[in-house]
Image (cartoon, grey):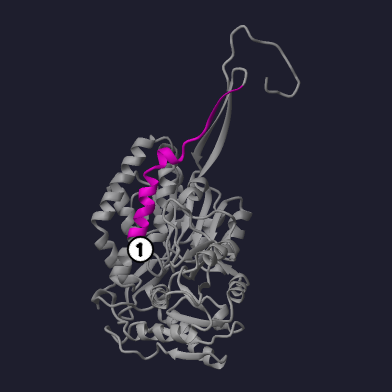
Amino acid sequence: MTELPLITHWVDGAPLRGASTRTAPVFNPALGAVAKNVILASATDVDTAVASAHAAYPLWRDTSQAKRQGMMFNFRELLNARKGELADILTAEHGKVTSDALGEIARGLEVVEFALGMPHLSKGEYSENVSTGVDVYTLRQPLGVVGIISPFNFPAMVPLWFFPIAIAAGNTVVLKPSEKDPSASNWMAALMTEAGLPAGVLNVLHGDKEAVDALLVHPDVQAISFVGSTPIAQYIYETAAHHGKRVQALGGAKNHMLVLPDADLDLAADAAVNAGFGSAGERCMAISVVVAVEPVADDLVAKITARLKSLKVGDGMRGCDMGPLITKVHRDKVASYIDLAQTDGAEVVVDGRGIEVDGDASGFWLGPTLFDKVSTDSDVYLDEIFGPVLSIVRVASYAEGLDLINRSRYGNGTAIFTNDGGAARRFQNEVQVGMVGINVPIPVPVAYHSFGGWKDSLFGDAKAYGPAGIAFYTREKAITSRWLDPSHGGINLGFPQNA
């Protein structure tokens, strides 16, 4: 029997087996089979990775902006040239189709390109002669070692939201990717090394809760970036903050799409399908609830249903529209909501179980699923299902739909579909959600704005990338300077005043 490949850590610029003997399986979701195993770090391994980053920090902090920028430009060019390799890794370990994998990489590349502007983005301010002979100026300086904990659903894009900015700002990084699809992080770390990054600046540590907990409390880790479910985001935030660290913890979502009666229903149906079933619904910005303002619900449901019947589900390498879910356990959990929906009185318009797929029968398949007339008291509505399940909730008015969205515990993303500019403007002002789309179903901001929600979708106030990312990975130092004339002197114990 052939021994499966073992995914090791990447520490100090090279693969590292580490001290731990624990491993976890890494599946090919389209085959339903274990393809590799991954090492799960112990607390000792965390110490080793953090020590590498800590030792590399002083030299990297003092490396010129020009050299850092040159290295990041090299990485950008290598990543763009070899993105097909990375896309194949994403498809093999996550299951998303190749076109979706390439789209994920493209959005990550945007942040790399944003980080190329660090010499300008991290500039301070200067005020001359605030008092006689006194100048005040500010500097933005790196924090030190930062930890990044990323989720399974975007194995390339989410790490790329964080480590290019952190590194370009002069920090060193320990990245802990999901153990479900870990290879992408090793691939990117090796590419950073090829681009000229010194050893120890970017380290990849694989593991589970043991590794996460060790990072959260490690005295040499200054900040934590996290994306994942809401309960874990809250735990990450509270634990790391209790240990004196900066934290940006992005949690879960239940994103609504409000469709007004004047909307273009073909556009709205296309958007609902694209945003609900791309990446098999495993997106924190997926649309999971369409709020249809009557009398359009019947027409909208019919249009969505017709589109779902044309989708091809199967192996992402075969040009299908939608791939499998990440694991059998997750697939079965998502599928369990179909029975729950029926129990709670919803109409199962499209049932994704038992569909014909273009792929191995053992894959973790669940086809597009559509519920209509979903009760807002049902767990189908309340839970973040995180799979290819779309719910239709019918309301009588704009005000009822807005109230429904604002009562949700989540506030990550939302969208409105309408041809009424006044209604759209009112919605963007009144909705209590962090990211809003107007006739745009997945309102993920471009790299030079920042990503993050409200309410239980974000813990703390630090959003990801953009200006918020620059602020998070640096700290401001204000300097008041006076160069005295040799003839000046004397003692004055009064409080300093501008004069």
Secondary structure at numbered mark 1: helix
**Figure quadrant of the N terminus:** bottom left
Is 55 rendered above or below residue 486? below
Residue stretch in magenta: 106-130
Camera-side residue of 234 and 8: 234
Is 210 rendered above or below residue 407? above
Is 57 rendered above or below residue 378? above
Residue type indicated by callout 1: Glu
Residue in view at x 29 percent, y 66 percent: 89
What residue occupies the far right of the structure in this picture?
494
How busy is the neighbourhood of tag 1: few (under 14 within 10 Å), some, or many (20 plus)? some
- Residue 217 position within the rendered picture, expressed as x and y whole percent measured from the top left: 57, 55
- Residue 356 position within the rendered picture, expressed as x and y whole percent measured from the top left: 31, 89
Camera-side residue of 277 and 483: 277
Residue in view at x 45 percent, y 71 percent: 286
Give the quarter of the image for residue 305.
bottom left
Give the residue pinned by disc 1: 104
| Residue 2 in view (yes/no) | no
Q: Is residue 111 magenta?
A: yes
- Residue 72 position within the rendered picture, expressed as x and y whole percent measured from the top left: 33, 45
- Residue 60 position within the rendered picture, expressed as x and y whole percent measured from the top left: 40, 39
| Residue 327 in view (yes/no) | yes
Q: Is residue 290 left or right of residue 168?
A: right
Give the quarter of the image for residue 445.
bottom left
Camera-side residue of 492 and 444: 444
Is 120 rendered above or below residue 331? above
What residue occupies the far top of the structure in this picture?
487
Residue in view at x 30 percent, y 50 percent: 76
